[in-house]
Image (cartoon, rainbow, N blue to C red):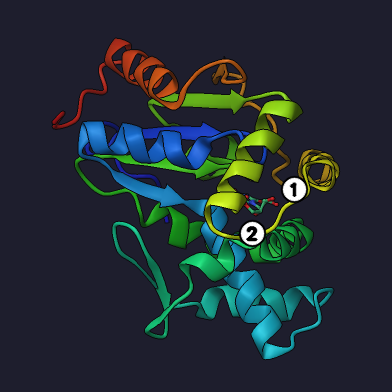
Amino acid sequence: MPELPPRSAPVITIDGPTASGKGSVADGVAAALGFHVLDSGALYRLTALDAERLGIDLDDEAELAACALALEPTFTSSRIFMDDRDVTDEIRAERIGNLASAIAPFPALRAALLDRQRAFRRPPGLVADGRDMGTVVFPRAELKVFLVADVEARAGRRHRQLIERGATADLDMLKTALHERDARDANREVAPLVAAPDAITIDSSHLGLDEVIAAVLELARAKGVAGGAR
Ligand code: C5P
């Protein structure tokens, strides 16, 4: 699917490593501008969940791509459903995140998800978060942000999220898992985690969520991406 003409639906991309706060920032920016949201990681997680359910071999690229093409998820403002089943919490499990990262390097799987991701771009605009939003999926995005945070800050955030959800979590194990996932996402050959040359990097290690959202909104205003601000 070709990209829509510029300005009919401006795109803000927010890429970055695991637990850098991309999702919360994307939600906050989209809410302020009245834009749609694409949580691209959810599509990789949904593919991992369904592949596991169907017993697909996690090395079988063609089957995984077919699984990704066949997905029929429904995204509401706060929940994700598959075949009427609410899978929001299930796909957020660390195990599914790691499975998603293990299958994400397959080019055929990534290609299978491309049109589905671009279809999220609709007026009045889109905020898309992931790893390759600014480099591959929306290379002509009006604003590209690369959101980073040091591993201590990211592990701490992930730890708090898991505890809030009633899960048990070990901080040191989380740090190790983050390092492993970062390395796999950054070193793969296809669509690695890397800042687009025209991306603006924000380090959120010592910033609160509202401060990061405000910084992105300021950049958006500077680029003339105003949206139907609320
Ligand atoms: O962002 P999230 O942690 O939900 O993503 C899960 C995994 O999906 C990532 O670790 C990454 O391997 C993969 N992913 C990707 N490209 C994206 C979004 C996620 O490869 N645009």
| Residue extending furthest toward the top | 222
- Where is 23 relative to 145, above or below? below
| x then y, percent, for residue 7 | 25, 31
Judged left or right of residue 173, residue 27 is: left
Q: CA distance from mark 2 to mark 1?
A: 9 Å
The picture places residue 83, in percent across and down from the top left corner, at: 41, 85
Q: Which mark is residue 110?
A: 2
Q: CB atoms at circles 2 and 1 under 8 Å apart? A: yes
Distance from mark 2 CB to nearest ligand 1 atom below 8 Å: yes
Q: Amino acid at mark 1?
A: Val
Q: Earlier in the sequence, mark 2 or mark 1?
A: 2
Residue 225 position by quadrant: top left
| Helix, strand or loop under label 2 | helix
Judge the density around disc 1: few (<14), some (14-19), many (≥20) Cα neighbours within 10 Å: some
Any atom of ligand 1 within 8 Å of the CB at mark 1? no
Judged from the image, the secondary structure of the residue bearing numbered disc 1 is loop
Q: Which residue is mark 1?
A: 190
- Count of number-bearing discs: 2
- Is residue 139 in view from this perspective? no
**Type of the residue with mark 2:** Arg
| Residue appearing at x 64%, y 59% in the figure | 110
Left or right, 70 with respect to 47, comes to left
Give the percent coordinates (x, y) of residue 1.
Answer: 42, 56
- Indicate whether 187 appears above or below 100: above
* Position of the C terminus by quadrant: top left
For the point 33% across and 41% down, which residue is it? 126
